[in-house]
Amino acid sequence: MIRHFFSRQFLLFLLTGGTAAAVNFCSRILYNQWLDFSTAVILAYLTGMVTAFVLAKIFVFKTSQQSMRRSAVIFTLVNLVAVLQTWAISMGLAYYLLPYLNVTRWVPELAHAVGVAVPVFTSYLGHKRWSFK
């Protein structure tokens, strides 16, 4: 399993995923101007997910034998697990752990950044094995 994380493909996944994560993170700040934090996290995740799919299909999993539609459906299912991870971690940090630690500055940003970073490994394996197999 470790060998999956020391490959050129994983490095490309990190780069494209990092770009999608930046879109996710920045769009959350934008959405948060009009929506509550929880809703903004979900919408930002969806925005980042569309970005991630396009970039992964073009740059990372170019040799996939599955149809675009099948890949998109499975990609969405894998990301349902990841969005739950992102949301739970972001909410837990923002409303419980960071206040408990008396962190008062940049709470939404810190919570969301950690929440976005956590599913990187589970998402890579899911997309490699199912979305773009």
Image (cartoon, rainbow, N blue to C red):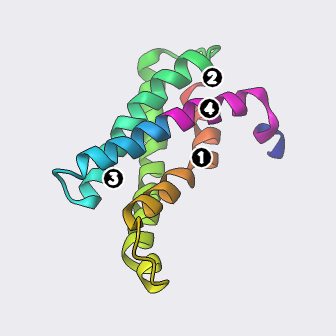
Measure the C-alpha gap from mark 3 to mark 2.
Answer: 25 Å
In magenta segment, residue 11: yes
87 versus 6 height, above or below: below
Circle 3: is it few (<14), some (14-19), or many (20+) Cα within 10 Å? many
Q: Which residues are magenta?
A: 5-19
Q: Residue at x 81, y 38 (%)?
A: 6
Q: Which residue is mark 4?
A: 15
Contact, mark 1 vs mark 2 (Cβ under 8 Å):
no
Q: Is residue 30 left or right of residue 62?
A: left
Element on which disc 2 rests: helix
Looking at the image, residue 2 lies above or below residue 88: above
Give residue 41's mark: 3
Circle 4 packing at 10 Å, graded few (<14), some (14-19), many (20+), is some
Q: Relative to the observer, which residue lies in front, 102 or 44? A: 102
Residue closest to the eye, 105 or 26: 105
Residue 1 position by quadrant: top right
For label 1, the residue is 120
CA distance separating discs 1 and 4: 11 Å
Kind of residue indicated by mark 3: Val
Q: Are marks 4 and 2 in contact (CB under 8 Å)?
A: no
Give SS at disc 3.
helix
